Structure formats: structure tokens, C-alpha cells
Image: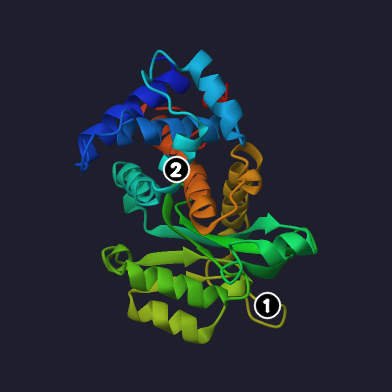
Amino acid sequence: MTNDLDALLTALYVKIDDEIGDTRWLGRPPRLTDSELVCLAVAQAMLGFTSESRWLRFVHCRLGAMFPYIPKQPGWNKRLRAALPLVKRAIRILATDSDFWFDNHWIIDSTPVECGRSRPTVKRSDMAGWAGYGYCASHSRFFWGLRLYLVCTPTGMPILWALANPKLDEREVLTAMLDREPDTVTDRPGLLLISDKGFASKEFEGDLALRGAKLLWPSFKREKPREGESLLKSVRQLIESVNDTLKGQLNLEQHGGRTFEGVAVRVAQRVLALAAAIWHNHKTGQPVIRSLIAYDH
């Protein structure tokens, strides 16, 4: 079977259309269906188009045979900004349709999502009050924007994700994520969550124990090595590579969002593209599960 972008979009369209079907609309139904919208959102992220105008011109030339109707830039922007619940549902559909959903090892980390640099941009931005200033340790610099919290399996399949103000405590954000979907933890006996030192806390570890999960993080300098820490470095590198995929291949930092809805759906668009690639590679028996090379051209 040919493993390329056309094959991915075809399989994704069939899967989403079977699971979601036609959404009921008041009045005239849209000419671009929800299933087609999901496929186009994935293709845009895969191909690295950060400009919507350039993307739609490319679709007419490259993908016009697969999508009979392509909206203009204002219509596409409006549909995409309103599609956050649809995109989140599509991510969950792909995750639960893979064997990785039943993995009882999770990797947790957060990464900056910059939304502005200049002080005038910060003052007039519609995201004021949601975004804020934070510090990026990997780049040794401050930024203004959000932090993307991603809970995924060792293969990179997204399980839970959220955007939060960078000033919030990481443990509080993760606790809120688990409270929102408690069944994802309780349905997995012996769940092991692997994190960095930012999530280290006896109180937080006790809260996870009540949920039936265990937290593993690197030991501090004056602390005795924790059980299972010998394998921690290789596993921790996995989440860093997942973040690198989101930023390096899916252009997470060039999302282009300027409003709450715009940033949220464009970040979700990248997470959906990652989930779609892993899902399709798994279904087609590819040797490298988290590889986007076959879909980026």
C-alpha cells in the first residue's frame, strides 16, 4: 500500500465520516462537510502552511480533485475557528482506535507556545488575561503566551492535552486535566506517569496514588535514586522528541493565532496531525510509528 498524504487523507476521511457522520445544521448545510474540514486541517499542518491564503491556493492546485468545494479565506478561517470541539473529538477517535490507547505508561511535559513578542502586541492582544509571561528553560528566555501540556504514550499518541497560562503551577494544570476526565486514569490499573522535576511533589504523588496511578520523576541531587530511574533518561527523551515533532515539523510556534479560538484550534490542529500520522502508520504497519516524512510533500 502506498503510504503518502493522499492515502492518509482517504483513510482519515472514511474513519471520521463513519464515526461522526453528517452533523445536523439549521438551514442550508455547509458545502464543506465536517469530515472534509478535518482532513484539510490535517493536510495543512502536515504540509507546513502557516498562511491560510497560500494554503487555499495550494489546495485548488494539489488537492482539488479530492475536495470538490474549497471555501475562500474568510470562510475557511470562520469554519476552522469554530471547529475546536470537532478537532478534539477527532483526536480522541484516532487515539481510541489504536492499541496505544491501552498503554499504561504515560509521558507528561509542557512546552511554551509563544503568542507575541513586542510590548504593544501584548497590550492590544485579545488574549490578554489568558496568556501571560513565562520562562522557557530550554532556551533560557522569557516569552509571552501559553504552555501546551501534553500527556501521551511512549509512541507519541496524544491522550490528554491542554493550554494554560504559563504562570500556573504545572501540577495544578495536570490535576485539572485528570479531574476533567477521571475515567482515563481509573480504567488503567497500575498506570505509571513519567515526568520531569517540575511535577515533583509528595502531595501530588499522593493524589495520583488515590487515583490508582504512580508518578516517576528524576531524583534531585541530594535524594536517593528512585526505583526505575535507570530507564528514565531514555524515556524522557521521547517526550522531548514529540515536542520537537510538533515544533519542527508541524510548526507549532508559527501557529498564527491572534484570538482565544484561533490559538486553541491551531494548536489542536497540530496535535490532530500528529495523532493522524501515528494512527495511519500503525494501521499500515510502518516500521517508524511517529514519522511524518511520507506526508509532508
**Disc 2 on helix, strand or loop?**
helix
What residue is shown at x 43% (from left), y 75% (from top)?
175
What residue is shown at x 57% (from left), y 53% (from top)?
239
Residue 156 visible in the shown view:
no
Does label 2 or label 1 sit earlier along the sequence?
2
Quickly name the residue at label 1: 220
Amino acid type shown at disc 2: Lys
Amino acid type shown at disc 1: Phe
User: Residue 201, position in %: x, y?
Assistant: 54, 82
Disc 2 versus disc 1: distance between alpha carbons?
48 Å
User: Residue 196, position in %: x, y?
Assistant: 60, 67
Residue 232 visible in the shown view:
yes
Query: Which quadrant of the figure has residue 21?
Result: top left
Q: Which mark is residue 78?
A: 2
Above or below: residue 117 compared with residue 286: below
What residue is shown at x 29% (from left), y 35% (from top)?
16
